[in-house]
Image: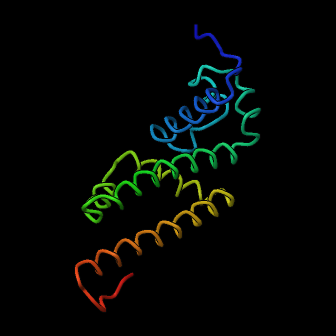
């Protein structure tokens, strides 16, 4: 029998909930996520999921933003490396990122708020990648090359 935690450690509890949500999404898809399943996997009382996030949309948004922040951190590391294009390419091959991204894209079709957040994030990423490509072309003395 798993002892249920009461959730006194707010940051730890939120992390446990987000970790459990991400695991369920990656293993079984976003549709398998429920507050009861998340709480069970996190070893928490199910009421704590709603206490910390209010709604399932808020939980999904928090997980999306955490994933985006981790992704952006890796992007900055890539952009500041000596081979930014190669590093970005290697980042794009990460299967864990692909799985959670696919689930968020599917969820975006059913949740307007998640869809708006995905759109905002994609536009920001496109700007970052365009800047990197333009900078790399400039460093390589390639002028007048069309950029996406």
84 up-or-down from 32: above or below: below
- Residue for point 37% across, 54% down: 77
Residue 141, given in percent of the width and then of the height, sits at 23, 84
Q: Nearer the viewer, residue 98 or 11?
A: 11
Residue 48, given in percent of the width and then of the height, sits at 72, 27
Viewport quadrant of the N terminus: top right
Instruction: Determine the image quadrant of residue 119.
Output: bottom right
Viewport quadrant of the C terminus: bottom left
Residue 100, given in percent of the width and then of the height, sits at 47, 48
Q: Looking at the image, which residue sits at the far top?
A: 1
Counting the numbered discs, the total is 0
- Residue for point 58% across, 28% down: 16
Q: How is the image coloured?
A: rainbow
Q: Looking at the image, which residue sits at the far bottom?
A: 144
Instruction: Determine the image quadrant of residue 75.
Output: bottom left
106 up-or-down from 11: above or below: below
Q: Nearer the viewer, residue 110 or 117?
A: 117
Residue 81, given in percent of the width and then of the height, sits at 30, 58
- Residue for point 51% across, 66% down: 122
- Residue for point 65% across, 14% down: 4
């Amino acid at each position: 029998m798993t002892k249920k935690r009461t959730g006194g450690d707010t940051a730890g509890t939120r992390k446990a909930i987000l970790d459990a949500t991400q695991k369920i999404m990656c293993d079984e898809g976003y549709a398998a996520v429920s507050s009861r399943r998340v709480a069970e996997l996190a070893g928490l009382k199910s009421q704590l999921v709603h206490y910390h996030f209010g709604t399932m949309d808020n939980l999904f948004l928090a997980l999306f933003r955490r994933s985006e922040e981790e992704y952006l951190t890796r992007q900055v590391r890539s952009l500041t490396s000596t081979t930014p294009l190669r590093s970005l390419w290697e980042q794009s091959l990460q299967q864990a990122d692909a799985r959670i991204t696919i689930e968020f894209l599917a969820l975006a079709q059913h949740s307007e708020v998640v869809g708006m957040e995905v759109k905002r994030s994609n536009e920001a990423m496109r700007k970052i990648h365009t800047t990197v490509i333009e900078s790399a072309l400039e460093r390589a003395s390639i002028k007048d090359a069309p950029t996406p």
